[in-house]
Amino acid sequence: MPWRALPGQVADPYAVWLSEIMLQQTTVVTVMPYYERFLKCYPTVQDLAEAPLQDVLALWAGLGYYSRARNLHACAQAVAALGGFPSDIAGLQALPGIGAYTARAVAAIAFGVPVVPVDGNVERITSRLYAEDAPLPGVRRRLDHLATLLNDDPAARAAPSDFAQALFDLGAGLCTPRRPSCLMCPWRGVCRAYASGEPERFPVRAPRKAKPDRHGLVFLLRDDSGAVWLRHRPEKGLLGGMTELPGTSWLDEAQDLASALEEAPVEALWKEAGQIRHVFTHFTLHLRVMMARVPDFGALHNQPGFACPSESLSRQALPSVMQKCLTVAGATAAD
DNA sequence: CATTCGTGGGT
DNA sequence: TACCCAAGAAT
């Protein structure tokens, strides 16, 4: 991992922190290109702190959980004001976007604090070591306690950074959710889940709720120059602070086309360019992409939004769901 | 303690 | 297709 210090090197707290924020609920493969772009664009935490929030959101676009990007920016400004990252857990956790896990991870990996960061990997490993039958998320506190017991090993306590990342590697490479490679596991001999014969049964999870559907329309309006009419979403909530195509509200059931078109930003000859389906964390969104062209955006002067030249679409903070809409309509936002 | 908050890849 | 899951945080 590019954020990982080589043997004998000192970890860069900025790089460790950035990687940990990006890796929250996100796979290494997905994070890698974003991480490289951020470090190239913002080599230091000061550079990130001085950047406009919209630029940060645009660079984050596609990674998801956009409150991470807003908190990342706020955190960078706080750290710049402090003159550097706090090196203790409490100081770290007081910063925006840094919770119990990330505070421990940065403390252990960047500052050598002897603590076990409990992420999904460590929860899985621990639940298997102890064959913990109680379901997540209720059993989280107990798993956290059991995980801290791993630090009873003097070798673990002597190398907090290596130990934490070794746990991640164990979880990602051997103690995997589906088919763990127990025969290669150094802890096979002390693992109760392995002894049970069904290690993949752990951790036990509570059944999850069904995901409802929502329906809406978006309006892709262009002028004679090819510019697109866009608008910013509210600062908080779903896709907070990101850029979007104007659209209807999202309802539990699809409404008829005529009444939906009444919500269009302007009266125009709207034609359906396509439909997209996008799965969010807690609902599935179905959008019909309506397209129209006007000579200019004069009629929109008192509408919320702004005109975006086609060549600067790629610099907008467009979330994946909006990229999909542009793509089905043939409006490329790729560079 | 339960919800809200993205997205892409694997099975 | 339909789930599951991934170095969680904020409210």
Image (cartoon, coloured by chain):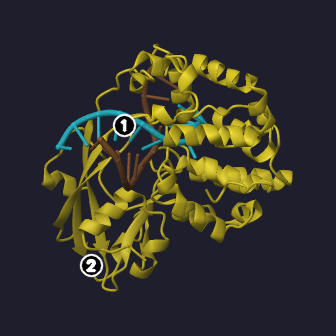
Chain colours: A yellow, B brown, C cyan
Is A109 positioned to the left or the right of A224 in the image?
right
Residue A282, numbered circle: 1
Q: Residues within 10 Å of mark 2 (few under 14, many from 20)?
A: some
Label 2 element class: loop
The residue indicated by pointer 2 is A294
Q: Quadrant of the N terminus of chain A?
A: bottom right
Label 1 element class: loop
Is A108 positioned to the left or the right of A227 in the image?
right
* Chain containing mark 2: A
Residue A221, numbered circle: none
Q: Earlier in the sequence, mark 2 or mark 1?
A: 1
Q: Residue furthest bottom?
A: A225
Q: Position of residue A268 (x, y in %)?
A: 21, 70
Q: Quadrant of the C terminus of chain A?
A: bottom left
Residue flagged by tag 1: what amino acid is it? Answer: His
- Choose mark 2 or mark 1, whichever is in front: 1
Instruction: Say which residue appears at 52% left-offset and 56% top-offset.
Output: A31
Q: Position of residue A34 (x, y in %)?
A: 54, 62
Instruction: Say which residue appears at 66% left-offset and 32% top-offset.
Output: A100
Q: Considering depth in this image, is A267 or A227 the residue closer to the camera? A: A227
Instruction: Say which residue appears at 50% left-offset and 23% top-offset.
Output: A128
Instruction: Say which residue appears at 62% left-offset and 31% top-offset.
Output: A118
